[in-house]
Image (cartoon, rainbow, N blue to C red):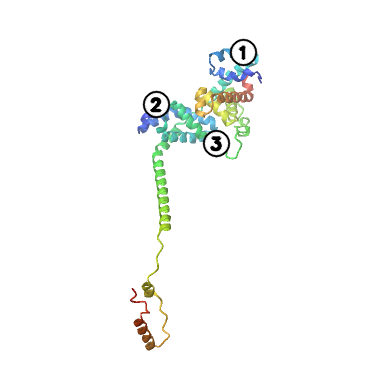
Amino acid sequence: MDLVEKARGGDPSAFHELVDRYAGSLFGLAVSLSGNAADAEDMLQETFTGAFRGLGAFEGRSSVKTWLTRILIRQRARHWRSTHRGKAATLSIEDAPDSSVATPSSHAATDARIDVTAAIKSLSPDHREVIALREMQGLSYDEIADILEIPRGTVESRLFRARRELQERLREYLV
Amino acid sequence: MNDCPHAQRLGAYHDSELSGEARAQIEQHLRQCPACAAELRRLGRLSELLSAAEATRISPAALRRLHQGLDAVPMSDLRRVAEVCGAIAASILLVCSIYLVKTQPALGPIPIWETVAVARQEPPTAAPEEQLGQWIVEDLSGKNGHDQN
């Protein structure tokens, strides 16, 4: 919060320090949501630009991380609408990376990562969001509900369905 | 797949999101339901898999671009403000112009001396002497439009 106050007071180095502090984790989230680093970088740029312009409106009712994550989720929704206008909201499995094209590897962990990434990418946007926020960002249900502006019960039910889908796609790794 | 009605709360239990009483109920149920116990184990394994999935790190070059992009934000904002002000000024100018045109008072009758002064004169058809006489007569009788009060 101190950094936000300093940035609001016109200290540019304070905002840059905010960027350094949160860019890493937000970038990881952006990649999980968008599926590629280029789109993730665009989303991150728009997120911090929006945060810079909205410094005056930040009231401190949530943590800085939650506030930035909320902005990122909104940017992601805008990006999704502009790139998938007219298409079905759910990614088909064909859009996921084709793990069958990968060179057979003796590294089981690498295969698992590829399959896990493909499974996450195959989820619907709503399910991918809650999985990324819970499993990768470690946010609580209340924080997720706050960020996505949905009831806590909806967070729980989306997580339940998302995990059921992932269990089905990754069942060979879960026995 | 596990069809137990309590399965829907396993995720919240796994995430430590249940309150004391709800948590106790699930723990009691887990002791009696092998299907839910197995699914809870799968949820734990799933979380391990998701955590182990390679976290994509932002490259130093990407971070540098991010900072450079943010440094440009104040100038782009200034340009945007200038564009908006220009559009507002143009709109005000247009509205005022339309207002002035619509409210301009209608012109009254044009004084006859102005029309006579610029009126196109017909080429004289009569001889010059006759035309001169005719003018004199008109002038004396007041029919020429002059001296009218």
Secondary element at image label 1: helix
> Image check: B28 left or right of A3?
right
Q: Is residue A111 visible?
A: no
Mark 3 lies on residue:
A80
For residue B68, the mark is none
Q: Please report, as a chain letter, where disc 3 is located.
A: A
- As helix, strand or loop, the secondary structure at mark 3 comes to helix
Q: Quadrant of the C terminus of chain B?
A: bottom left
Looking at the image, can residue B51 be seen? yes
Q: Residue at x 59, y 13 (%)?
A: B25
Q: Nearer the viewer, residue B94 or B60?
A: B94
Earlier in the chain: of badge 2 and badge 3, it is 2
Instruction: Decide: few, some or many residues near mark 1? Use Cα within 10 Å; few <14, some 14-19, many ≥20.
Output: some
Q: Compared with residue B112, is residue A121 higher up or lower down, i.e. above or below? A: above
Q: Where residue B47 sits: x, y (%)? A: 56, 21
Q: Nearer the viewer, mark 3 or mark 1?
A: 1
Q: Quadrant of residue B73?
A: top left
**Kind of residue at badge 2:** Met
Vertical position of residue A171 compared to residue B77: above or below: above
Which of label 2 and label 3 is nearer to you?
Answer: 2
**Helix, strand or loop for disc 2:** loop
Q: Residue at x 42, y 58 (%)?
A: B101
- Residue beneath the point at 56% across and 26% down: A154
Q: Residues within 10 Å of mark 3 (few under 14, many from 20)?
A: some
Quote the CA–CA distance across marks 1 and 2. Answer: 43 Å
Q: What's the CA distance linking mark 3 and mark 1?
A: 41 Å
- Closer to the camera in the image, B53 or B113: B113
Left or right, residue A146 beside residue A16: right
Residue that badge 1 annotates: B29
Badge 2: residue crowd in 10 Å (few <14, some 14–19, many ≥20): few
Circle 2 residue = A1
**Alpha-carbon distance for marks 2 and 3?**
30 Å
